[in-house]
Image: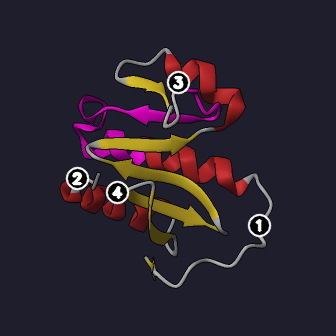
Amino acid sequence: MGYDERLAERVRLALDEVRPGAIEKKMFGGLAFLHKGKMFCGIVKDELIVRIGLERYDESLRETHVRSMDFTGRPTKGYVFVEADGCRTDKEVRRWVKQGAEFVETLGSSTRRLQRKTRTR
């Protein structure tokens, strides 16, 4: 499947401002970014995945270029795909990354150990 490396670089730049110390890990045939063991955003092909939680889920789906995350054909509530057109500017990327990072900050830490193929940002 792969992921858009240019978008990944833009996410990394946003992380430097929003969530230094995030973990980067290959997942879903793409790339995921985690904080305290919880994924808060990722990239599959040229789309950004954002974990926004249930409270912001319906509101986010009303935005242009946003749809529910549906790897298996069933939506995964609390996660959205942001199409490439919804990530045209660095400001848009930073906003989505920040939303995901803020949401996972409200969750407890994961007790599972991260796999060896991780990279600290």
Q: Is residue 3 left or right of residue 69?
A: left
Q: Distance between the residues labelled 4 and 3?
A: 19 Å
Residue at left 38%, top 43%? 48
| Above or below, 109 relative to 64 | below
Q: Relative to residue 28, is residue 12 depicted above or below?
A: below
Q: How crowded is mark 4: few (under 14 residues within 10 Å), some or many (20 or more)?
A: many
**Snapshot quadrant of residue 24:** bottom left
Instruction: Calculate the distance from the C-alpha at mark 1 to the C-alpha at mark 3.
Output: 25 Å
**Lower sequence index among marks 4 and 3:** 4
Q: Is mark 3 on a helix, strand or loop?
A: helix
Q: In which quarter of the image is residue 3?
A: bottom left
Q: Do the residues labelled 1 and 3 touch (CB within 8 Å)?
A: no
Q: In which quarter of the image is residue 74?
A: top right
- Rendering coords of residue 61 (x, y %): 51, 20
Sequence order check, earlier mark of 1 and 4: 4
Q: Mark 2 vs mark 1: give the one in front.
A: 2
Q: Residue 60 carries which label?
A: 3
Q: Is mark 4 on a helix, strand or loop?
A: helix
Identify the residue at the far bottom of this view.
116
Task: Please name the amino acid that badge 2 sits on.
Answer: Asp
* Residue closest to the far top: 62
The amino acid beneath tag 1 is: Ser
Looking at the image, tell me whether mark 2 or mark 1 is earlier in sequence order: 2
* Residues in magenta, as a range: 74-94
- Mark 2 → mark 1, Cα distance in angstroms: 29 Å
Q: Do the residues labelled 2 and 1 touch (CB within 8 Å)?
A: no
Q: Does residue 81 show up magenta in the picture?
A: yes
Q: Earlier in the sequence, mark 1 or mark 3?
A: 3
* Tag 3: amino acid: Ser
Q: Estimate the spatial distance between the alpha carbons at disc 3 and disc 2, rounded to whole Å.
A: 22 Å
